[in-house]
Image (cartoon, rainbow, N blue to C red):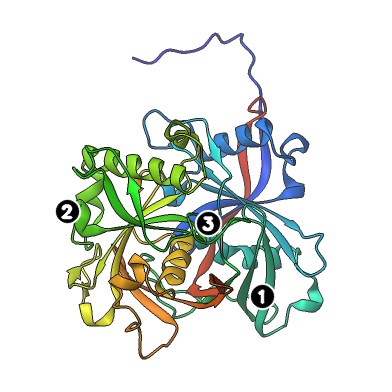
Amino acid sequence: MTTSTDSKATFAPQIKVPATYMRGGTSKGVFFNLTDLPADAQVAGPARDALLLRVIGSPDPYGKQTDGMGGATSSTSKTVILAKSDKSDHDVDYLFGQVAIDRPFVDWSGNCGNLTAAVGSFAISNGLVDSSRVPENGIAVVRIWQKNIQKTIIAHVPMTNGEVQETGDFELDGVTFAAAEVQVEFLDPADGNGAMFPTGNLIDDLQVPTEVVPSGTLQATMINAGIPTVFINASELGYSGAELQDAINGDAKALAMFETIRAHGAVQMGLINHIDEAANRQHTPKVAIVAAAIDYISSSGKAIDKNTIDLNVRALSMGKLHHAMMGTAAVAIGTAAAIPGTLVSLAAGEGQSNAVNPGFVTFGHPSGTLKVGAEASQVNAEWQVNKAVMSRSARVLMEGWVRVPSDTF
């Protein structure tokens, strides 16, 4: 039974905030120009978080985000704030906020690699890139400063007759329709200012409760590249590495296990001091399982031949198995695959990867396959990766204003 409110009561009216709803890679998010936000939300803090939560429709105890722009998955509960960069060698500043679905929490601890593909397009279309750097036809090279992790990303955005070219024939597994290809380069992708391998090891014994594995340890490669990621051999957890979403997301015990692994990995990587802090750092680190290439059927029904991939990888985001692969995690995969001795490189056959495209690795994920490349070298016994490269696509889905009650923040 529904109830009505007192007809004499007064309520705050809604306000309109200019916004663009965009797909980038296999994610969707609400994009804002910093200067279009209400004054209180133009600076980091509770007002900004409250605004973005209301825009997306969180927290939602029903888990649907029905009263907001979110799509009730980690891939579609995202926000982006862009501004003209004050750095002379960059065009645009990019800030990413991962919005929790069931909690009043916006995680600013990492980047979204998928939505990165849409940043250049938005920046050009909204005048954030100097017109002298945008060709009438050809490829616009947009220099992005990723503020969450303080790193440079280069987006190669196709242009046709002075407009961003969004349509094309580039197919990306996990996205239904073809679009224009956007090549993205992540320069010096070690996340933040820390070491690429925070423990100093390519493979560690990760200490976990005996309820996870009887031995109390798991082999793990823990890397800061693209986004902090904990890689585990799928076989140690009883998986083949070719699982689809339902196999893990429908198993509450498995999800709890992966969250426990993530929390202990975060402590061992030095991201948090105690596992109890992991609940307030949901976006990072990611947890992924790796395995040698095997045949499987993707979520779309497409048959994936083991001879077309180098390995299988499944990754979790915000507590659930991702339907494809997070862009930042793909950077971590490409980087780890380029460094001999990591679990990823070993699963890929240690140096046998992608003879047709040297320097690239092709991995299978629930929706299909993805190719990513990385340039790695050793300097003073420390591994460094100059850049990681992948192709994505992006498209504007809707633009105009998003409305929120004026007493939201």
- Amino acid residing under circle 2: Gly
**Quadrant of res 232:** bottom left
Q: Is residue 62 left or right of residue 282?
A: left
Query: In the rendered image, which residue does mark 2 sit on?
Result: 238
Query: In the rendered image, which residue does mark 3 sit on?
Result: 112
Q: Nearer the viewer, mark 2 or mark 3?
A: 2
Residue at 56% x, 59% y: name it. 195
Is tag 2's residue or tag 3's residue first in the polypeptide sequence?
Answer: 3
Residue at 39% x, 42% y: name it. 264
- Amino acid residing under circle 1: Glu
Is tag 3's residue or tag 1's residue first in the polypeptide sequence?
Answer: 3
Q: Is residue 245 left or right of residue 370?
A: left
The circle drawn on residue 163 is 1
Residue at 77% x, 77% y: name it. 133
On the rendered image, what quadrant is the N terminus found in? top left
Q: Nearer the viewer, mark 3 or mark 1?
A: 3
